[in-house]
Image: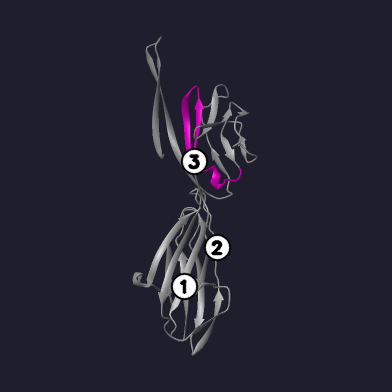
């Protein structure tokens, strides 16, 4: 139970009070996954579903353009979304005779696109760096929801925070997805090694890693091996 709201209706003729308890259920789902909002005890007479302040259904009549092809009322008046999108996030309420029966809060998670650039060049390109040249690398984690944390590793050791210039997070303007950037500035040690950027795991997804293998001589050409961890999706 995420929370509860108590609402009372007074029956003046019978001097009685009828109390209805609305439980708030939090649903975290991966983007494009289905989700069902139950409404136990709802009747099809004077029952309706709301999304925020907007009525989606009155009884079984569609009342909003928000109700697309992936919205459907089930036989028991539960609300089914076949493919959850970021635009579907928010609060859904099932109401009968002006009394709240159920409240559902939807959060949709999207994994980031993670990649490394070095000296402003995409790490998928062949790079040539002089020996003892300072490395300037940026890790990008784009279009995630929620925002993720980024961690650097050099030769399998976590990078000291003093080597990380700064981390910045920006949103798309609608607070639906976030872009995260971590900047690394250091000198490479040894003839060969690897640089790894790791994004933190989300509730619905595992962490993701991208790494760059380097060879250092007088000059070296780095061979990039981007790696994307398999997404592990768990039901909530």
Q: Is residue 172 above or below residue 68?
A: below
Is residue 83 magenta-colored?
yes
Residue 90 marker: 3
Q: Is residue 113 above or below residue 53?
A: below
Mark 2 or 3 closer to N-term? 3
- Say which element carries label 2: loop
Q: Which residue is mark 1?
A: 137
Q: Which residue: 41% across, 40% down?
A: 2
Q: Which residue is mark 2?
A: 230
Query: Which stretch did the figure color magenta?
Result: 82-105
Cα–Cα gap, marks 1 and 2: 24 Å
Query: For this view, does 35 lie left or right of residue 181?
Result: right
Which image quadrant for residue 147?
Answer: bottom left
Query: For this view, does 40 lie left or right of residue 3?
Result: right
Q: Position of residue 225 (x, y in %)?
A: 56, 74
Whether residue 108 is visible here, answered yes or no, is yes
Please identify, in this view, whether the residue under mark 2 or under mark 3 is nearer the observer.
3
Q: Position of residue 126 (x, y in %)?
A: 58, 78
Say few, some or many: other residues with alpha carbon within 10 Å of mark 3 (under 14 / 14 to 19 / 20 or more): few
Is residue 92 magenta-colored?
yes
């Amino acid at each position: 139970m995420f929370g509860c709201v108590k609402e009372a209706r007074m029956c003046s003729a019978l001097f009685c009070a009828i109390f209805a308890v609305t439980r708030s259920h939090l649903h975290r789902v991966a983007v494009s996954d289905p989700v069902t909002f139950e409404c136990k005890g709802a009747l099809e007479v004077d029952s309706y579903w709301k999304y925020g302040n907007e009525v989606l259904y009155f009884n079984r009549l569609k009342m909003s353009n928000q109700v697309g092809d992936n919205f459907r009322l089930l036989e028991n008046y539960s609300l089914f979304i076949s493919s959850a999108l970021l635009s579907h996030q928010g609060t859904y309420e099932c109401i009968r005779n002006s009394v709240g029966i159920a409240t559902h809060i939807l959060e949709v998670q999207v994994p980031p696109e993670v990649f490394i650039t070095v000296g402003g060049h995409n790490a998928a390109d062949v790079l040539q760096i002089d020996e003892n040249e300072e490395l300037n690398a940026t890790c990008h984690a784009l279009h995630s929801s929620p925002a993720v944390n980024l961690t650097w590793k050099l030769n399998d050791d976590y990078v000291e925070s003093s080597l990380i210039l700064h981390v910045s997070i920006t949103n798309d303007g609608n607070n639906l997805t976030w872009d995260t950037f971590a900047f690394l500035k250091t000198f490479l040690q040894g003839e060969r090694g690897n640089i790894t950027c790791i994004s933190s795991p989300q509730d619905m997804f595992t962490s993701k890693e991208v790494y760059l293998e380097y060879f250092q001589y007088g000059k070296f050409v780095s061979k990039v091996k981007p790696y994307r961890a398999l997404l592990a999706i768990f039901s909530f």
